Image (cartoon, rainbow, N blue to C red):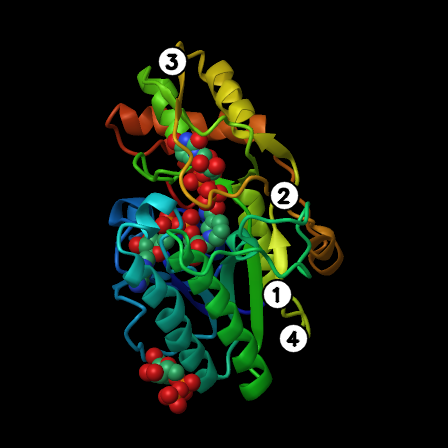
């Protein structure tokens, strides 16, 4: 039961996080308009939601204006995996910047709240560890990651300028590496790569020596944080880090995936891509204070929930109904 049913726009709603967010908001009783151009997302992700009368799908590229009527916007549209955002870097910057302008323009016309999914990448290769929101970052403005990092930084600028100039109600979440079911087999990010490789008995590809660290958040924890942020009072704008402070080296991640899958894959080393951050860990004091939020699912538990989803995908069957049942009572 919801106190007030809202019409909610989720851009990038057919992607990894978008699928989970659409499910969660439907479960909470809202009407969802999912907007996606299917660059990295797919109809298949949200197929199980299409029969729901409160769910509507619109194929649209957010770099173009969008005139609709809704009560709230979650702006997720943007490829997030380095492989995919570097495939067409100009389009990545356009998506972040023009997408933000169009969605902010929409929010301004309708006088409605808008949440931006920003990223830990705004900290670049950080020299402060763990990263608090007050840290301005250490970012290469013209490297291969810049289309994403600087695009997201510019989007944050736009959000705060619309807030200051037009009194818009904004919420900015800085998301740290999140994983879980509904990632693509070819997503390219480290958790999905390692699980796929382990399950197929292929070599586990560690870039560099594997000593670089990341902090991995399970997707349901992350979605809970986003929804809490959207529902905070107007004065809470963020930016707020949302992530799991449990920090692991990439080698530790590989060993954990091998142990949990029982795989005999070998670990191989490949060159470290340019500008790859050496360490990353969120300071979540703000999330604890303003959202009463902290993650509940540790890496091993989250991997145990994610591996069956990939096993099912690799069997070529429909996406795991067991997992869908966990994720959403609406799904089956
Ligand atoms: P994803 O690539 O799975 O999803 C992105 C979605 O946006 C896809 O469905 C894609 O088709 C859609 N999209 C891309 N360009 C678009 C455009 N121009 N118009 C309309 N739709 C477009 O990635 P994700 O992990 O679900 O990430 C969602 C959001 O969260 C992104 O904005 C990302 O930057 C942010 N984020 C994610 C993480 C993470 O670890 N998953 C970390 C930091 C930030
Ligand atoms: N916009 C949109 N939907 C709307 C309102 C605006 O897509 O409902 C787009 C519009 O095309 C514009 C952008 O959002 O390019 C920014 O709008 P804003 O009103 O801030 O700027 P302006 O139109 O004055 O340039
Ligand atoms: N990585 C790796 N092997 C892979 C994919 C990624 O060793 O097959 C490393 C990558 O170099 C980085 C870390 O894992 O240090 C996280 O990479 P990912 O692409 O998941 O996210 P991001 O670098 O944006 O945090």
Marks 4,2: beta carbons within 8 A: no
Label 3: state its secondary structure: loop
Q: Which of marks 2 and 1 is nearer the N terminus?
A: 1
Label 4: state its secondary structure: loop
Q: Mark 1 points at which residue?
A: 231
Q: How far apart are marks 3 and 2 (CA)?
A: 28 Å
* Residue at 54% in and 80% down: 161
Category of crowding for the residue at label 4, using alpha-carbon neighbours closer than 10 angstroms: few (below 14), some (14–19), many (at least 20) = few
Is disc 4's CB within 8 Å of ligand 2?
Answer: no
Classify residue 199 as left or right of residue 220. left
Category of crowding for the residue at label 2, using alpha-carbon neighbours closer than 10 angstroms: few (below 14), some (14–19), many (at least 20) = many
Marks 2,1: beta carbons within 8 A: no
Q: Distance between the residues labelled 1 and 4?
A: 9 Å
Q: Name the residue under label 4.
A: 234
Quarter of the image with the N terminus is bottom right
Position in image of residue 306 (x %, y %): 45, 30
* Residue at 56% in and 87% down: 165
Query: Outermost residue toward the top?
Result: 264
Label 1: state its secondary structure: loop
Q: Name the residue under label 2.
A: 281
Category of crowding for the residue at label 1, using alpha-carbon neighbours closer than 10 angstroms: few (below 14), some (14–19), many (at least 20) = few
Q: Which of marks 3 and 4 is nearer the N terminus?
A: 4
Residue 265: mark = 3
Ligand 3 quarter of the rendering: top left
Position in image of residue 286 (x %, y %): 72, 57
265 and 106: which is toward the camera: 265
């Amino acid at each position: 039961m919801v106190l007030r049913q809202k019409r909610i726009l989720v851009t990038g709603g057919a992607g990894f996080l978008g699928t989970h967010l659409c499910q969660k908001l439907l479960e909470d009783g809202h009407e969802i308009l999912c907007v996606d151009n299917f660059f990295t997302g797919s109809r298949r992700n949200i197929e199980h939601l299409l029969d729901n009368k409160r769910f509507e799908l619109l194929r649209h590229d957010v770099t173009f204006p969008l005139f609709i009527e809704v009560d709230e916007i979650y702006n997720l549209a943007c490829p997030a995996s380095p492989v995919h955002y570097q495939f067409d870097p100009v389009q990545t910057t356009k998506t972040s910047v023009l997408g933000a302008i169009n969605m902010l323009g929409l929010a301004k016309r309708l006088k409605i709240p808008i949440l931006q999914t920003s990223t830990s990448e705004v900290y670049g290769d950080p020299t402060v560890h763990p990263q608090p929101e007050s840290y301005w970052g250490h970012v290469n403005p013209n490297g291969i990651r810049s289309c994403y990092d600087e695009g997201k930084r510019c989007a944050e600028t736009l959000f705060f300028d619309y807030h200051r100039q037009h009194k818009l109600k904004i919420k900015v979440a800085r998301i740290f590496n999140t994983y879980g079911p509904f990632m693509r087999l070819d997503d390219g990010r480290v958790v999905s790569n390692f699980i796929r490789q382990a399950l197929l008995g292929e070599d586990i590809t560690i870039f560099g020596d594997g000593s670089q660290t990341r902090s991995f958040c399970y997707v349901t924890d992350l979605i809970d944080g986003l929804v809490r942020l959207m529902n905070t009072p107007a004065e809470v704008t963020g930016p707020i880090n949302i992530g799991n402070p449990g920090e692991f080296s990439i080698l530790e991640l590989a060993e954990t995936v091998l142990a949990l899958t029982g795989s005999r894959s070998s670990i191989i080393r490949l060159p470290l891509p340019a500008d790859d951050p050496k360490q990353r860990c969120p300071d979540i004091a703000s999330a604890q204070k303003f959202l009463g939020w902290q993650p509940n699912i540790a890496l091993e538990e989250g991997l145990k929930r994610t591996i069956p989803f990939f096993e099912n995908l690799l069997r070529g069957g429909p996406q795991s109904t067991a997992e869908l049942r966990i994720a959403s009572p609406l799904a089956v």
